[in-house]
Amino acid sequence: MFRAAVTNSRSNVGRHALNARVCCPVPRSQAPCFFSPPFIEGRRFISAYGYTQAKALVYSKYGEPKDVLQLHKHSISPPNGTEVVLRLLAAPMNPADVNQIQGTYPSKPPFQMTLGTQEPSAVAGNEGAFEVIATGSGVKNLAKGDWVIMKRTGQGTWRTHAQMDETNLIKVENREGLTPLQIGTVGVNPVTAYRMIKDFCEWDWMRAGEEWLIQNGANSGVGRAAIQLAREWGLKTLNVVRERDTPDATEKLKKDLYDLGATKVVTESELLSREFKGMIHEFTRQGKEPIRLALNCVGGKSATSLAKTLAPGSHLVTYGGMSKQPVTLPTGLLIFNDLKFSGFWVSKWGDKNPQLKENTIMDILQLTRAGKFKDIPVEKVKWSWDTDGPELAQGVQGTLSGFRSGKGLFTYEGGD
Ligand SMILES: NC(=O)c1ccc[n+]([C@@H]2O[C@H](COP(=O)([O-])OP(=O)(O)OC[C@H]3O[C@@H](n4cnc5c(N)ncnc54)[C@H](OP(=O)(O)O)[C@@H]3O)[C@@H](O)[C@H]2O)c1
């Protein structure tokens, strides 16, 4: 918890301040430090001793975000050695973040006392864009003003500020032309789409423009990324979305995806209808253009219907279960069509392939810079220093409810 004493020319008080890592104002007796600078209510400040005041959305038990998320105020000591202090720019609210808070997600960040919370807690959130605001003397690859993302998920990104070791961060080398939204949402959804398309199908690149992938949840963050990557790589996409309240709203959603480069967009009702076989026949020029990959984040009947469209020897990859229904497969597809069924989890994949993950991210950011990768629609939740905990938690609450106009996104606007 405490780092070794450093000698400097400051007063004793200053030296103590430099030695403490993260301090919490209350209760003082439980704070993991022997000195903590005073807090000024209502605004944040960097103290004379280089402390940064911070707030984090933490949870100490599992449940609904509105019931268990709490805004915890603490202060962060000046960075030592290879540590850096970060300020949040933007962090999305992904379905997995909420599952994690509910305790239903397989990866569970440990509950700890590191931030001086009253009970052992974890900081919520798995991805986001941060700006470096201070660096330790041993930091080699980062400088004040750099934009970074976390190398791994599970580090806790729903916080105004964080102190991290530089080895846990990916620097965005050339941030020109990029926004916090683009950087803060690149590491999970686009990487998932990218790897599923590249790693689960041996595309015949000589047949560019004649092979298809089909996907449900096509308007999700992953789905939108898949459409644009497939377009770039010469693959056709058949995209399934759920109907909206009105035909106009459904058409508008379809148009959104056509604007991204979708080849065909159909509704879930069309997918489940008797006529769908005929539609597929027509789309694929009487089967001359095979559907070779299916991406499933819904499950249930939707997944079964995707599988039925696949050419023999093809692959269905399940990466989400938004309908909470199991994936059921007709036996014949396995025996006679030699279909393959897999799952994909980007967190595990990224932990095993850190360099490839970084390369994948840089590749996607390059496409973004070139204007070939459009922003996802978002519902911004502005986070200023004075925004209260319940308001932030309420912003998270709708993440799993369907038919949203955009993904929730925290944007921190509280300055350094
Ligand atoms: N395995 C991995 O590594 C990995 C990585 C990233 C994401 N994921 C998973 O991929 C899925 C999409 O994530 P995202 O961040 O891209 O999503 P998102 O942008 O938040 O969008 C949510 C998507 O889920 C759909 N949806 C919501 N409730 C549904 C329901 N009851 N039945 C059918 N569809 C429903 C929405 O469709 P409507 O607009 O019609 O409601 C929308 O397409 C999630 O399950 C997520 O956990 C997995």
Image (tube, rainbow, N blue to C red):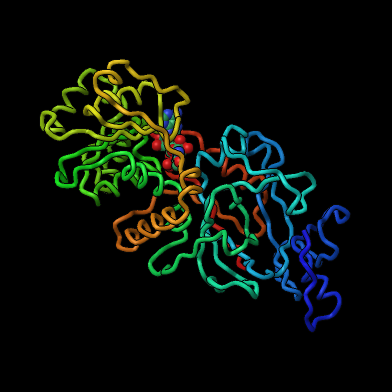
Look at the picture and state if 5 lies above or below 287: below
Place of residue 270 in the rendered image (x, y in percent of width and height, measured from the top left): 26, 25
Residue drawn at point x = 19 percent, y = 39 percent:
211
Q: Which of 266 and 143 is in front in this view?
A: 143
Place of residue 274 in the rendered image (x, y in percent of width and height, measured from the top left): 22, 17
Q: Which of 337 and 249 is in front in this view?
A: 337
Place of residue 94 in the rendered image (x, y in percent of width and height, measured from the top left): 50, 43
Place of residue 38 in the rendered image (x, y in percent of width and height, measured from the top left): 81, 66
Q: How many labels does the image show?
A: 0
Pick the quarter of the image with the N terminus. bottom right
Q: Is residue 320 visible?
A: yes
Most distant residue in the bottom direction: 9
Pick the quarter of the image with the C terminus. bottom right
Look at the picture and state if 408 lies above or below 373: above
Residue drawn at point x = 76 percent, y = 74 percent:
49
Look at the picture and state if 67 lies above or below 408: above
Q: Can residue 404 be seen in this view?
A: no
Residue drawn at point x = 54 percent, y = 71 percent:
142
Q: Taking 372 as reference, is 157 left or right?
A: right
**Image quarter of residue 20:** bottom right
Q: Taking 182 as reference, is 198 left or right?
A: left
Most distant residue in the top direction: 331
Q: Taking 390 as reference, is 213 left or right?
A: left
Q: Where ligand 1 lies, by image quadrant?
A: top left
